[in-house]
Amino acid sequence: MKQRGVTALGREPDLSAAWTDEHIKTVFDHFANQIDNQIQNQLVSELMVRYAAVSKQLEIKNRQLARSDASRREAQVIALLGNWELDLQTKKFWWSDTMQEILEIEENHKESDLQAYFRKVHPDDLAANIRIAEDLFKGVVPAEFRHRLIMAGGRIKWVHIRYVLSYDAQGNPLAVRGTIQDITGPKETEEKLRKYNDHLEELVREKVVEISASQMATIYALVKLAESRDDDTGEHIGRTSEYCRLVASKLWQQEMYPDKINASFIENIAKASPLHDIGKVGIPDSILLKPGRLMPEEFEIMKNHTLIGYETLAGVEKEYKMNAFIKTGMDIALCHHEKWDGSGYPNSLKGEEIPIAARIMALADVYDALRSKRVYKESYSHEKSVGIVKQGRGSHFDPFLVDVFLENEQAFRRIFDNSLKQ
Ligand SMILES: [Fe+2]
């Protein structure tokens, strides 16, 4: 008799037994169970395969995540960078462990909180920090902010904070996220550089003032020496320098001749104006010191002081090419007797052919000469002098400069009168 096997599904049915209804049901149940189990086994194996694949993927993803988290942390540590977030709905403040390290707050400090942060802020920067925090709660963020923290032992740490505001779908402020970076190192370098630069600038400024003062003293001494031969005094050169500075400054303020007049032009004309009659050193005493009017041939010789002055300065200019001060001096020396209508000397230049510095000088020189006593005339009053300058508008003088003069004639008067009091 065939040995009937025992399977996992129980005893196999005896197929030789009588096929009663009950036996038929047993045989069918047995086969049905066999089929169910096969399907179940297939499903389980398939599930196990799929689970293994998913587990593997999950493990890879976790590994990647851990790696990127570690990299982020490593990068943040290297960059001395932390990050933080303020939830505007819950008012909760969160900071990263790297931010906690920057703040040098102990690890057992359970919660990130603004008060703990404020305790680290330098007292001088606290008010600004509180103001920013109040704004943050209203959803107002600055682009960035730098301030000091105060660490154990009073050590100063500089931090740079950046802010980004995020919104919900309706456009309402949701949270403020940001970074905090320890910038103490760069800040110290920056501070050292700033101090170094300040020191250098101070040294340069001192030197410039020193050189400028000594140059001016030399120029004044030479000009006074030259002018001591006629009846001009040192006051004339001092005053004409002031008039020139005044007119040039007004033109600058009114943006007239913007391509020619700037801050350095004002400085140059004020300093170079004493050179206008430097050529008088080459004029004989018999002409320069002659009381009364000059004869025509004497006047021709007198006119040469413009050329002598120009050539003297041109000789200097060869040594100091492109020196704006010398160039202004050359323009003034050569052209301060030119007239707007072309009737002046030595080159009968007309209108804007005459350099602007010389046009200013002409007006300043004439006003001062009118106010001064000369061997051939008494001093004129301010009003009379103003009238004469006004008459020369468009003939002797640049009409625009006469307008500026008339607007500032009281300042001219003060410059002249004050020089008499000294
Ligand atoms: Fe002159």
Image: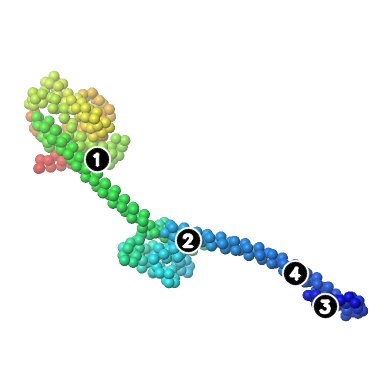
Whichever of callouts 4 and 3 sits on the residue coming sooner in the sequence is 3
Residue 53 in percent (x, y) is at 66, 63
Q: Residue at x 29, y 35 (%)?
A: 260
Q: From the image, tell me which residue sits under label 4.
A: 41
What residue did someone put label 2 on?
A: 73
Q: Position of residue 97 (x, y in %)?
A: 45, 65
Q: CA distance from mark 1 to mark 3?
A: 120 Å
- Marked residue nearer the N-terminal end (1 or 3): 3
Q: How many numbered circles are shown?
A: 4
* Residue at left offset 48%, top offset 67%: 89
Numbered disc 1: secondary structure:
helix
Residue at left offset 44%, top offset 63%:
98
Q: Secondary structure at mark 4?
A: helix
Q: What residue is at 24 percent from the left and 46 percent from the top?
A: 203
Q: Evaluate if marks 2 and 1 touch, with contact meaning CB atoms under 8 Å apart.
A: no
Tell me, yes or no, whether the two marked residues, 3 and 2, touch with CB atoms within 8 Å: no
| Comes first in the chain, label 1 or label 4 | 4
Return the disc, 4 or 2, that comes first in the chain's sequence: 4
The residue sitting at the right extreme is: 18
Looking at the picture, which amino acid does disc 2 mark? Answer: Arg
Pick whichever of labels 2 and 1 is earlier in the sequence.
2
Using the numbered discs, state the Cα–Cα distance from disc 3 to disc 2 in whole angstroms. 64 Å
Identify the amino acid type marked 4.
Asn
Determine which residue is flagged by label 1.
249
